[in-house]
Amino acid sequence: MTAVLVLEDGTRFEGRAYGASGQTLGEVVFATGMTGYQETLTDPSYAGQIVVMTAPHIGNTGMNDEDTESSRIWVSGYVVRDPSRVVSNYRSQRSLDDDLVAQGIVGISGIDTRAVTRRLRDAGAMRGGVFSGSDLSADEQLALVRGGAQMAGQNLSSEVSTSEPYLIPAGGEKLGTLAVLDLGVKTSTLNYLAARGFDVHVLPQSTTLDAVLALEPVGAFYSNGPGDPGASDQHVELLQGILREGIPFFGICFGNQLLGRALGLGTYKLPFGHRGINQPVVDKSTGRVEVTSHNHGFAVDAPLDGPFDSPAGFGRVEVSHVNLNDNVVEGLNALDIPAFSVQYHPEAAAGPHDANYLFDRFRDLVVASKDKK
């Protein structure tokens, strides 16, 4: 069956239907990872997005139940060049195409994904649609795409967050309760936190400060997630309350953007974002370069050189990490309160694991805070 990817600027890429047939709309973005397509598909941060894979051959190792990062596939659509016709891996339980069809994910294959990526790099991420088996005219398809929602201004946390709290018990020596606000959290993240001795209490995105404090947590954590941080005022207010209580805080990805807003900083939309598992980031405190896993289309607006005062009154703050490709802020460190964050995913399911030490850094921060008391 033929299919077409339509971008809101009118660009069309014709190919073959892949996965479920039908039509889907979303923000078209590209991911640069050579591996880890299963982790990408099941990352809730990709909700609302049609993901273009820059690696040409996708699906070689099939799908399994162990490597999923959540309970389902979250992408709105999927774009690949050459889907593997044969699955070859001893851990595979089914093909990628099987899961795409079963979960109703509309995709397209057989198009030049390099050309799509170059278009997005030149013009920026834009709305798009995948249409297969459609009797709509080109003009009708384009009208649907242009009538779709912009990512800017969208709060998608309620779509990806857990509806009920749940607990992942600590592994090893128990350190205490950790309150995790689920904004689209990944399974690997929770497992790494539990392995550091935290009883990980995963909370819905609608959680109140009173509910957090009732847990008597030794620390708090904000996860990755989709959407515009500028549309998440309730999560910013909750975080400000947590910071005023002196509870040690760690945030990743969306959590980094929300810490920035809680400290009084602004955020902005990147032209085409950072997505993939090969983003170079420098730790300013050590000069060490880390290859990191990313998925974000928004960033924090903060001065890169030297400490500055938090506009919201939380003392001094510094930018801790910077992207070497475009100087985007990749981390924040509060100097007068126990809080820090990074823009990338230190759990890095599918690799690399250069930033895994950040979970230990957070544990050390919590231990130091407990010792002061």
Image (cartoon, grey):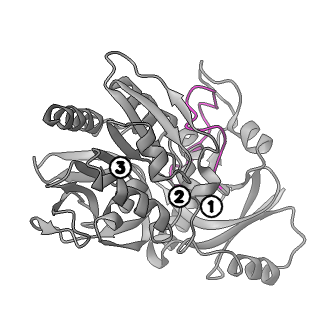
Q: What residue is drawn where x is 14% and y is 46%?
A: 288
- Please report contact status of discs 3 and 2: CB closer than 8 Å, yes or no: no
Please tell me which residue lies in front, 26 or 285. Answer: 285
Q: What type of secondary structure mainly makes up the magenta span?
A: loop
In the displayed structure, does residue 116 sit left or right of residue 78? left
Instruction: Rate crowding at label 2 as few (under 14), some (14 to 19) or many (20 or more) other CA atoms within 10 Å.
Output: many
Q: Kindly identify the amino acid type of the residue bearing the numbered disc 3.
A: Gly
Q: What residue is drawn where x is 38% and y is 56%?
A: 239
Please tell me which residue lies in front, 356 or 35. Answer: 356
Q: What residue is drawn where x is 33% and y is 26%?
A: 196
Q: Kindly identify the amino acid type of the residue bearing the numbered disc 1.
A: Gly
- Please report contact status of discs 1 and 2: CB closer than 8 Å, yes or no: yes
Q: Which mark is residue 251?
A: 3
C-alpha span from label 1 to label 3: 22 Å
The spot of residue 167 in percent (x, y) is 52, 29
The spot of residue 373 in percent (x, y) is 17, 35
Which residue is denoted by mark 1 in the rendering?
48
